[in-house]
Image (cartoon, rainbow, N blue to C red):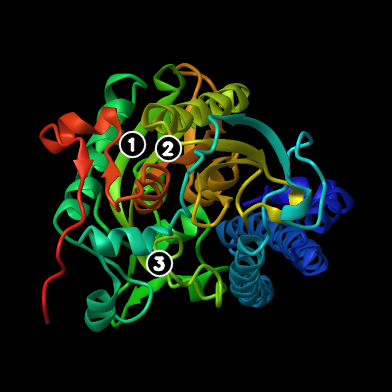
Amino acid sequence: MLDLKFIRANPELVRQGLEKKRMQADIDAILGADEERRRILGEAEALRAQRNRVSEEIGRLKKRGEDAASLVEEMRAVADRIAELDTRLGEIDARLNELLLLVPNLPHESVPVGPDASANVEVRRWGDPPRFSFDPRAHWDIGAALGALDFERASKLSGSRFVLNRGVGARLERALINFMLDLHTTRHGYLEWFPPFLVTRDCMVGTGQLPKFVEDMYHVEGEDLWLIPTAEVPLTNIHRDEILDADQLPLYYTAYTACFRAEAGAAGRDTRGMIRVHQFNKVELVKFTLPEQSYDELEKLVADAEEVLQLLGLPYRVVLLCTGDMSFASAKTYDLEVWLPGYNDYKEISSCSNFEDFQARRANIRFRRGPRGRVEYAHTLNGSGVAVGRTVAAILENYQQEDGSVVVPEVLRPYMDGLAVMEPAAPIAP
């Protein structure tokens, strides 16, 4: 959430930021409601001051035995007017909050301006795409031949865009989760959590999924509970409505969770395989930092996610997103895109963002520099460390062999009881 005072003082700057992001918000309505709110506050405060003065005068008159009936009647009218103003003020505050929740974060000055992904800037590449002496296959065909992935039975269970991991495929998924968590907790300094997969509306509002993206979320009918689209939601909300000690910051948190996304706006995109599904596993990285630390911490966050891909030997590139390709809540975002031979292209496998104080204002996450310091909003960051299903796809495609087998990356073998090669397996007969 943007600071209302900032919007009031810099309306054109806010409009320019929205234009750069190719997003809309009713800034005129916000300014109009804010002006009316301040007018009502002024009138209510003046009436309360008048009531206090007259109440003292009524007391003096009664003490002298004089008639104060006319002043008492006048104050009844004043009290009624104050009640009317308070009611109207409550309505305006609710409306202002609704409007402010729909205003996206503004892009940082270092973000390239552009309309869409075509204007994203490649920062660096790591690793060379493998060269094959045969036509490489896509991960859904490789996984089926290994007996590792079953999309048809998943569809029978849950509909389209779900996957069943079977045998070595389930083992690979579990190995990746444990490998990523071990890396981030032992080498990168993150504290591991295992949060609920269902959260309240307040949590979803706090991180920016609601109310803007309600169609992309799964809601539990009859309850105020939502399936999380990412562990960012519960991890960030751990400190909702709290005041942290500045000496505690930065805080590094990580968690494995399943993630659930309706993908309402993704019709026709990557409909096959594991790239865009409704349920997937992910290891998430979340940071709470001092404002002056957050952009250094963003670079470290990206490096932590990169090391996952480097240790797995997966070629990737780092891309700085332009203003028109950024998310609603982000001030600056780097995407890590892994090479997938089956697509002959790079595909996003991690998105690392600095939200500055945008989420902290929505979730009321604050800190204080010392016992007498003023309360300030923390900066929050998050990134995928990384998406597990897409990593499975990348391993299957980059490590595939001509005979249909797939080499297991060396760093994963201790997590798979020393298994070095996944061999094709006969499917389960119907």
- Which numbered tag is attached to residue 277? 3
Q: Is residue 401 left or right of residue 63?
A: left
Mark 1 residue crowding within 10 angstroms, few (<14) / some (14–19) / many (20+) = many
Task: Examine the image and state in which quarter residue 85 appears.
Answer: bottom right
The front one of 314 and 362 is: 314
The amino acid on which the numbered mark 2 sits, given as a three-letter code, is Val
| Identity of the residue drawn at 81% across and 67% down | 32
- Which residue appears farthest toward the right when viewing the image? 12
The mark nearer the N terminus, 3 or 1, is: 1
Q: In this view, does 154 lie to the left or right of 54?
A: left
The mark nearer the N terminus, 3 or 2, is: 3
- Which numbered tag is attached to residue 404? none
Closer to the eye: label 3 or 2: 3
Residue 141 x/y as whole percent: 35, 64
Task: Examine the image and state in which quarter residue 286 appears.
Answer: top left
| Relative vertical location of residue 352 with respect to residue 135 in this rendering, above or below | above
Q: In this view, does 414 lie to the left or right of 332?
A: left
Mark 2 residue crowding within 10 angstroms, few (<14) / some (14–19) / many (20+) = many
The span from disc 1 to disc 2 (Cα, nearest Å) is 6 Å
The span from disc 3 to disc 2 (Cα, nearest Å) is 23 Å
Mark 1 and mark 2 residues within 8 Å of each other at the beta carbon: yes
Mark 3 and mark 1 residues within 8 Å of each other at the beta carbon: no
Residue 159 x/y as whole percent: 32, 82
Give the structural element (helix, strand or loop) at label 1.
Answer: strand
Q: Name the residue under label 2.
A: 286
Mark 3 residue crowding within 10 angstroms, few (<14) / some (14–19) / many (20+) = many
Q: Quadrant of the C terminus?
A: bottom left
| Identity of the residue drawn at 83% across and 67% down | 28
| Relative vertical location of residue 312 with respect to residue 203 in this rendering, above or below | above
The amino acid on which the numbered mark 1 sits, given as a three-letter code, is Thr
